[in-house]
Structures are given as C-alpha cells and as structure tokens.
Image: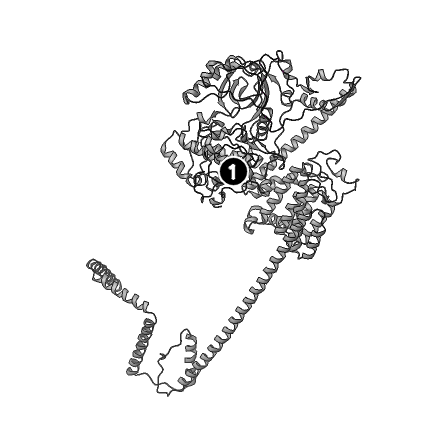
Amino acid sequence: MPAATTARKYGKSSKRSKAERLFAELPQSPVRVDPLSCLAGKLDALHIQSDAGKRRVERQPPSPRRKQPPPPPPPSSSPRNESTSPLQGSLRVLTWEDVCPAGDDIVKIAEASYAEVYRVSNARGTSIIKAIRLDSPIKRQTKAQVRAGLVDEEPHAEADVDGELQVSEWLADVPGFVVYKEKYLVRGKATGRLLETHRAFQQRMKRQDPGRAQFYPSPSRYLEDTSFLVVELGDAGTALEDWHVEDESQLWDIFLLEAVALARAENLAKFEHRDLHEGNICVRRVSSPRKRDGDDGFFGYSGLEMTILDYGLSRAQDPADDEAKPVAFDLERDLGLFSSTHASQCVVYRRMRSYLLRRDRKCIPADGHKTPYAKGVDGPLSWDVYAPYTNVLWLAYLYRYLADSFGGNKRDLARFKRETKEMWRHLDPDAADEVLCFGSAADVVGFAVEAGWIRQDQLIGTGASLPDKEDSIILAHPQAHPQAHRPAMAVSGHDATLDDSFPRDLLSSSLSSSLSAYSVGSSAASSTAARRSSQMSKTYRQASTLFLTRRLPEALTTLTPLIVSPEKDEPAPVARASRTTRIKVWSLYLTILHAVVEMEPDDGKEAFGNQQWRALCLKVRDGLIWEEVVRDGYHGVEGDVDSDVVINLATLLLAHARDQTLNQRRLETYLATSNTPNLDLTVRPDKSPVPRSHAGPRHRSPAPGTTGAETPRDLNARVKILELYTLHVLLRNNEWDYAREFISVSSVLDDERREAFLQALESLQEEQQEQERQERAERHRQEEQLRRQIDDARRLRAENEEWERKRLEDEARRTRRPSTEVDYGVEASPTPGRRHQRISSRMAASSSVGGKAVAPRTFTARASMILSRLRAVLDGLAASLNGNPALLARLLAFIVGLLILVGHGGIRRQIQRVLAASWTKFKTTAGMGTKISYI
C-alpha cells in the first residue's frame, strides 16, 4: 500500500465507521473480587423481616459523573466521619504505616494530574502507588510553607476517580499500559519516611526549575481523618523525563512502542490519553540491546519496554458495549489548563481544545480559552466525543521531546530524522493546510508497517502475549486494624458491618445453607463463564490481529473453533456467548470471507489451496453462509439472528452472490419470523443454553413484538435491514413496484422515514432510467459506428477490386508483347507489397509463351537490362527522398559526419592502424594456409 493512504485530511469526522467497530475488543478478564464483598452485596438486596417490622436494605445510588464542587471540609476538631459512600465502603482501610512500614522503601517519583505517584519496594516486589486526596480535613499551611510557594491541589470527589479506575481495568491487558493491581482507602497521619521523600522530591524539583511550585500539601499536614484513595499499579520503570536516550535504537523503540500501544487502545476502547507528556511515560530495560540486521526494520533492537501511566484526563468506552456512555474527564471545569504556559506540554492541551472547537490544525492562543463549553463547529464543546487525533498530537509531542533531549551521537539523530522525514511531514501539527495528516495512532502504526520500520510478525508478537498479572505487595496488619479486612455495608444511611446489620439469630440455618449453596453455585457458574469469556476474548483478539495483518488463512483457522460445534449434539461456543461477543465473532468471520472472495484466483489458491478456496467462494456466492450462521450460531431459529449479523450477511451476499434471489428470500424469512414470536416451547428451551426467562439482558434476544424493534438500537438496525431489502436487494431483482408497496405499508417506518425511503427509491429509479437511456444511446452510437465501418469496408473493397481489375488488364497487355521484346522484370510503376502477384504474373507470362524457344541474351541486352534496373533503383530513391525530405537530411548529415570523422587526423590514423593490423593478420593467415596446403 502506498504510504499516503495512511494520512487523512485534518478535521474528518471522528466517529468510527461500522467496519472499525467490528474489530473492537471483547471485555477483559474480570478483576479479582473479594468473596465476602460478593456475599455482602447479595445480602444487601434481601428483605429481612423481624418483630420490629420490615426494613429494606438498599444500595446507595452511584455518584453522578459530574457534580458541583464539594462543600468546604469540616474543621479538624470534628470526630472521624464513618464513610457511607459505595467506593469507600467496599475498600480495605489502611494507614500510611501499612503502606510503607519500617524496612520498606518509598520514593516519590512524580506528580500526576490529581495524584502523587510513589514507588514502593519491599521483599515482595516493587509497585507504583498513586495517592489521590479525597474530600477530607487537613491542617492549614504554615507561614514557612506559604513562603516556600506550596500550592494545595484541591481534593477530588469519587466521581473524578471512578473514571480513571475504570479505564485502568479496561486497559490492564493491553501491552504498553500499566498493570492494575488493587486499590485501598488510606487514612491517618503520615509516617516519617513519607515526609522525607516528599521533601526530597520538592528539593529536586526546585533544582530543576526554581520557579516551580509543589502542587500537593506536605504530609506533615495530614490529620487522623485525612483520606486518600491509593491505587497500586505494577512497576513501570523510570519516567522518560529522567531517562537518558543515548542511541538511535532507543529513539525508534520508544516512539513506536507508544504508537502501537495507543493504536491497540484505540481499537479496544476508543481510547484517548489526553495527557501523555514525558512524566506519564516510563521506560525500563528488559534485555540487552541488539545490533540492527541490515534492512530488517528499525524496531525492537534497544531492549527497552515502554509503559503508559495516568488516565486522569483520559477518555475511553466500555469495550463490551459500543452504545455505552464514554468515561471522560471534563476538562472544561478548569480552563487554567489551557491558559497555562509553565510547561512545554501546555500547548498540546490548547491544540486539543482548539481541534474540538475548530476541527482544523489552527491553535487558539492561551488567552482565547476563557469561555467554558464554548460553541464550536459541531455545537457546544464536549470532551465525551471520540477524537483520536489527540493521540496524534501527543505522538508529535513525543517526537519533538525525543529529538530535543537526545544525548547520543548527532549523526544517529540526523539519521533518525532523515528516515522519518516523510512521517513527520504528516505528523507535524504546524504543517501547511494542504498537507495531509494522520487521524489516529493506528494511522501512524500503519505508516510504520508500510515503510518497513515494523515487521508484521513483530506487530503480532507485541499483542500475542498479555501482561502478567501481579499481586499486591502491600499487606495490612489485621491485629491493629481488624476492620480493614471486613467490608462495610451501607444501611439506611449508617455504616454497619455484616455482623451488626444481620444478627445471628436472624440468619436461620436454612437461610444460611441456602445462601451458602447459592454462593458456591453462583461462584462456580461465574468462574466458568469468566473463563469461557476470557478464552473467547483471547481467540477473537488473535484472529482480528491476524486479519488486520492480512494473514487470512491463519485468521480463519484461529476463529473456526468459536463457530464450529466441538461435538455433534453440542452448540458452537459462539452460540453460548453474549450478544455483543456473538455479533463481533460473526462479523469478523463474515469480513474474513469477504476478503477471501475478493482475492485474486492465483493468490487464493496459493494461500488456501485450490479446493478450500473454491469451497469458501462457493459458500458465499451460493448463499450457503446464511444457513451456516443460523444453524451454528442461533440453533436453527432464523428469527433469533442478531440484526447486526443479518445486516452483514445481506451486505456480503449483495456484493458477491450470483444473484439476489436467495438474499431476498432470506431477508423476507427473517422479517417474517422476527415479527412473529415462535411459540414452540417444546423445542427452543432445550436448544437454548440459557432459558429466556432467566437469561440476562446480554444473553437474551429482545422479545419480538409487532415490529421486531423494541429499543432505539433495535429500531435503527431494523431500519437498516429494510433499507438493504427495499433499496438494494429488491431493486437488483427488478422488483420496483413491490419495493414501493412494501415501504408504503411497513409498520417500522414512521412518516418521515417512509417519505425518505420513497424519495430514495424514486431517485434510484430515475438514475436507473437515465442509465438505461445512456446505455441505449451508447448502443445506437456503436451501431452507427459499426455501420459506417461496414460501408467504408465495402467501398474499400470495391476500390481494391477495381484496382485489381486494371492491374490484370495491364498484365494481359504485357503478355501480348512481340517475342523479340524481353521483359527484364523492372516495371515502370511497381506495385508495392504485392510480390506474389508479380510472381504469378510472370508465371502467367511464361505459360502464355508456351513452348516457344527464347533467343539467348546478347551482351548489349544484358547491359541494357542492368542500366534499366539501375535507373529504376535511382528513380525509387529519388521518389523516396522527394516524399520524405527528412530522410534526405539524415542521409546528408550521415555523409557529412562520416567525412568529418575521416578528416580528423587522430581518427584517420586509428583507422589506418586498424586496417594495417587487419591486412597484416590477413597476410599471415594466408601465408600459413599456403604452407599448410603445400605440406
């Protein structure tokens, strides 16, 4: 593919196409959950009745995504408030002594968007912890702290934290992103080690930037009620701002590793980082560097591993639900981020906001970001939208940072810039308007693959292995904090433990045994479903990666176990999957088949073998694929097929089927069966893996009603199916009147959609009529042209026949010459290109003479013949020169050039030497021949 195909015009719609959504990843493996928390959650929903009357235990509603700023904290003298929030009530409560006890090493390494970042090491390993201060009391600053320029970062509500934690769990299995371990609630005063590392970090920052203030309060101000949410992550190495990039291989690997990680996250969760500066990228060495092997790419020689941190400002979406509301931090709440100029990355924040407002590359200056939720070209600004170009902006920032901070040989940097010159042309946010630019990190990776920097096997290899799960290294002391291991449960606005909320006399033996059996059964079923979902997720990811790298046979082989029944009486694994998983697997399968059918015959036979490739093509072209999907994925019930899968099936047959008769019949069957419920209760519960009455919403197809569209999503899919059926399939079968009638009586279409469909149908019919008129006109023109060609051929034939007749008459006159006249074979007006006719005429003349004896030619006759032929040659040469003056000019030029060459002394002497040597050699050879002949 040409490299230019990876670049797009800046400002294109950021919404993903249907084809891109087909490759969104499945949900990741569930995070470990404490069994006691699961049991408490189930008990929380029970209705317990005692002598005092009924009391309903309800869950607290989740905090809203956006909320007003929290009220000022209560005075420090107030007693400790028991947490009633769902977040705090479900976490282990630790102290700072638990986090960094004596003997453990803790070092503050960074300050993120709204968290302090520490590295904790002990005998169990190394972890990174992020401490996020929640709304809780804290001491006021001392005068010395005010003079030192300390700035208090505002505490954060739980809603601000939920999003980052959710994104961490979604991306935990993506290579290049930090490994998520666990989270805790930490309360109490700080330890001496924590205060010491805090001061050391402040002194280090002052040395690097004397004007920089520390944005987080000193640990010396923590009170007993000061609360932090602490998130434990895997150790990612050294921050890029503290890493010394010293050779060219590190330039290549750091940049490409970040691009590949972002591209995978875009594909999985529509991810945008939005804060990817050098402090949020960590680097560590995992192997020794290798020497580059000739022209074998530039990737993978440094031995480094890169990890992306901090999703505080990020945007992502649930991989399991394309329609889910995205998780995104609202940056409009603090416009100071865009007007700030204290760091080099501030311009990237302004570029992101400018892009969302203008949809072009022009950057609004710092003083132009004063109005929150300003109106842009797409309406009021919203950070919920998916705009992957923000990842491109941070890749451009990384490219500049690596070039500016490179500490190695300048020739290595020059070679890196020279090799990436074309990429930077499309990556540069300051490029001219007419220059195409990348639209996402996936475009950058595509460019790198096409340029040969990354091999396809390397791209597959970086995604084939998932990050290793790591255990927490932070342990609490149960003797000192017995409540730390016992989850609290909110009941009627008060905190109570499990034992306090449910006295033992209320939990009868039968209830306890029922709960125990239910817990064990649910745990086993959940564990089995989780393993199955995880295995399907891994298989799907491998198959989609193989497909994206055009390894179609391997992709089809990898995906086949999901769609083929392992045994005769068992359904295929895809039939047991959730609706989202089922749609994605079948969509990928149909997409692979589409690519297989579009292959050239030689390529298809070479990749799959002659027999298999023909079988796959026949499966699609004969429409057998529809029956396969219904049989293996939906237990043979046509009406249960997911509407998205029906759309893909119809589109596939529309593109490759021999005719649209089968496609029309299948769509009509689906529309009929999905409108009418199947009341055969004796068959379907046995075939269905999950009974409809007990299946969850993700495993249950919507109950069909009068239209088969009970939700907005179902309605949109239904409208799409009707569009394919009425505006494409029926028209291919020339069913114009039936299509118009079907649209008019459809109960799915409202008046507005019906009018739009009828207008589209009328427009398509007019286009077809116009096309038919043009085809008739073209056929008429071709017929007229053919008729003219036939007339010309007849006229030319008549002229040739007339010319042939005259020639024969001339030949006949020549044969009647006196016997004394000799024909020397030179005609006054020779006939060009007809040598066989001259030969035949001579043979005819000879036959006319018969057996008469011809007198022998005298010397005068032979001389006359030679002169006549020479004259004929000269006349022909003269005619050629008169007809082509350029030929005469070339002849004269050749003669003049030859004379000049001969007149040149050096050339003349050279010719003489060659001739003399040739003559000498000839004489020697002749003399030798004479001697040999004599002997």
Count of numbered labels shown in the rendering: 1
From the top left corner, tell me how far across and down residue 64 is, in percent: 63, 28
In the displayed structure, 764 sits above or below 163; it is below
In the displayed structure, 591 sits above or below 469; it is below
Q: In this view, does 456 lie to the left or right of 681?
A: left
Q: Nearer the viewer, residue 95 or 635?
A: 95
Q: In which quarter of the image is residue 501?
A: top right
Farthest residue, direction left: 905
Q: Is residue 832 left or right of residue 747?
A: left
Residue in the image at 43% along x and 75% along y: 836
From the top left corner, tell me how far across and down residue 918 is, in percent: 24, 60
Q: Can residue 865 be seen in this view?
A: yes
Element assignment for label 1: helix
From the top left corner, tell me how far across and down residue 303 is, in percent: 46, 30
Amino acid tagged 1: Leu
Q: Quadrant of residue 587?
A: top right
Q: In this view, does 294 lie to the left or right of 586?
A: left
The colour scheme of the drawn protein is one colour
Q: Which of 398 and 886 is in front in this view?
A: 398
Main secondary structure of the magenta stretch: loop
Does residue 870 show up magenta in the picture? no
Q: Can residue 850 be seen in this view?
A: no
In the displayed structure, 654 sits above or below 299; it is below
Q: In which quarter of the image is the C terminus?
A: bottom left
Q: Residues within 10 Å of mark 1 (few under 14, many from 20)?
A: many
Q: Mark 1 points at which residue?
A: 357
Q: In this view, does 282 lie to the left or right of 891?
A: right
From the top left corner, tell me how far across and down residue 894 is, in percent: 28, 64
Q: Give the range drawn in magenta.
A: 60-84
